[in-house]
Image: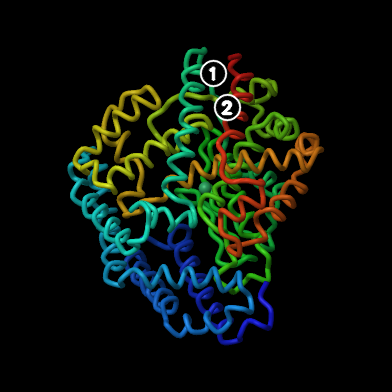
Amino acid sequence: MPSPSLGLELLERLGELADLGHAGQLMAWDQQVMMPAEGAAARGEALATISRLHHDRLVDPQLGALLQRDAEAEPLIVRAVRRDHEVARRVPGELTAEMSRAGSDGYGAWLRARESNDFAVFEPALRRNIDLARQYAACFPEAAHPYDPLLDRFEPGTTTEQVSALFERLRAGLVPLLSQIAMQPVHQSLQGDLPVAAQREIGLEIAHAMGFDASGWRLDDAVHPFASSPAIGDVRVTSRFDDESLTGLFALMHEIGHGLYERGVDPQLGRTTLGSGVSLGVHESQSRLWENLVGRSPEFWTHWLPRMRERFPLTLRDIELDAFIRAINVVRPTLIRVEADEVTYSLHVILRFELELALIDGSLDPGDLPAAWAAKMKQFLGIEVPDDLRGVLQDIHWSEGIIGYFPTYAIGNVLAAQLWRVAQADLPDLDAELTRGELGSLRAWLREKVHRHGRLLTPPELIEQAVGGPLDPEPMLEHLRAKYGALYAL
Ligand code: ZN
């Protein structure tokens, strides 16, 4: 924790960096939630300026000197900031600017390609983004694999080799489970009228039970749900409901899970650059744990289903707990990642990871991407890709030059199951508490194990400390085999 022994000059610099990050987050939140459309161009400029100022301050040699001087005072804080400082210094400013331009051009090309459902329209922009990602990777010549520095932007300390090995085991478990399920009769998902207003009301009740409180949180509408946290006491979550499914309700639990992480960081790390979640994978473990391991369990719905029946008398009045649980846990190979279930989701991610690796190491030409995509969809999920829109053009990430991000989604699923296993051992009454709608001891446990550390520990250190070992796909595979083995009578 920061102590007076950390020099005031360094503390002031960390404070400025945190404030610039705060401003950028707030402007980005506003852009998606409040801003009228015509504000977009000016907002783009303003965000670019904030990000340039942040970068300039971070690479300032004066900061490096202060880190040197105060190295002994707060070794963990200094270590984390020095790492940010050194990574930022490696990448030339022109390359960063070019990546940012190529990302926004790429986004435009992607939108046009989606309109005409034609990958060829997007291909030149993708080629440029891949080329720039390779140039970025080349700034870290000591890396064992050119994908390592790209992955490191989102999951610091985890290597390509480790992710490849993890995903190999995960895939080897998921593909046979999926083919067993696919041989069973298809379960029906929820059908009928589920009014948005009632979903919002019960969503807010669930959010409160999870830890949402009006003094430190906001909930607003946005086209794509997300969570953002300009400060530890200022957590902003967005949601979107539709009146034919409960997707929005699960998305809300997901985003509250992200918010709880940010809200649970030790306040002493506030106004430093360490007062937020440590990596995207660890973040996703929090959202997935609440969305899937809590939110799709019979224990949780033992408490909440009676309340759902009251809210949705037309559709849910007569539904039994078993039928409801089957309906919210339908497994089916589908084309679209963001609509995928607990079993197939990680396969969508592994597919993208393998394609990214091949694009970065040069073994796959961007022009051959749609064919490579289709071949892997057939291999992993057993389905044909009808067109580019439902294939290679479905995700925004590559259009903006974001490569190395996808693996964190599956890392989150894996880690969520590992944490869940330890939580169940540490909290023997957890299942009983869930059936009574009590979520407080789980939240406190997560805060203690994960949230409070902010960015003080590295992700591998945090994982080791929380679950007693490195990332391991076995708890997730066991959870899925047990759960879906029972649901589908395998
Ligand atoms: Zn998420």
Q: Which residue is mark 2?
A: 329
Q: Secondary structure at mark 2?
A: loop
- Nearest the eye: 328 or 157: 157
Answer left or right for 268 relative to 107: right
Q: Quadrant of the C terminus?
A: top right
Q: Secondary structure at mark 1?
A: loop
**Is the residue 390 above or below the residue 488 in the image?**
below
Q: Quadrant of the N terminus?
A: bottom right
Q: Residue drawn 47% across and 36% down?
A: 346
Q: Which residue is mark 1?
A: 187
Residue 418: horizontal and vertical position, in percent? Answer: 63, 40
Q: CA distance from mark 1 to mark 2?
A: 9 Å
Task: Please say if the residues under marks 1 and 2 sit with CB atoms less than 8 Å apart.
Answer: yes
Residue 306: horizontal and vertical position, in percent? Answer: 73, 30
CB at disc 1 and ligand 1 closer than 8 Å: no
Name the residue type under label 1. His
Name the residue type under label 2. Asn
Answer left or right for 426 relative to 175: right
Q: Residue drawn 52% across and 35% down?
A: 243
- Nearest the eye: 245 or 369: 369
Residue 259: horizontal and vertical position, in percent? Answer: 60, 55
CA neighbours of label 1 inside 10 A, class few (<14), some (14 to 19), many (20+):
some
**Is the residue 415 above or below the residue 232 in the image?**
above
Q: Earlier in the sequence, mark 1 or mark 2?
A: 1
Which numbered marker is on residue 246?
none
Q: Quadrant of residue 336?
A: top left
Residue 388: horizontal and vertical position, in percent? Answer: 26, 35
Q: Residue drawn 45% across and 73% down?
A: 85
Number of numbered callouts drawn: 2
CA neighbours of label 2 inside 10 A, class few (<14), some (14 to 19), many (20+):
many
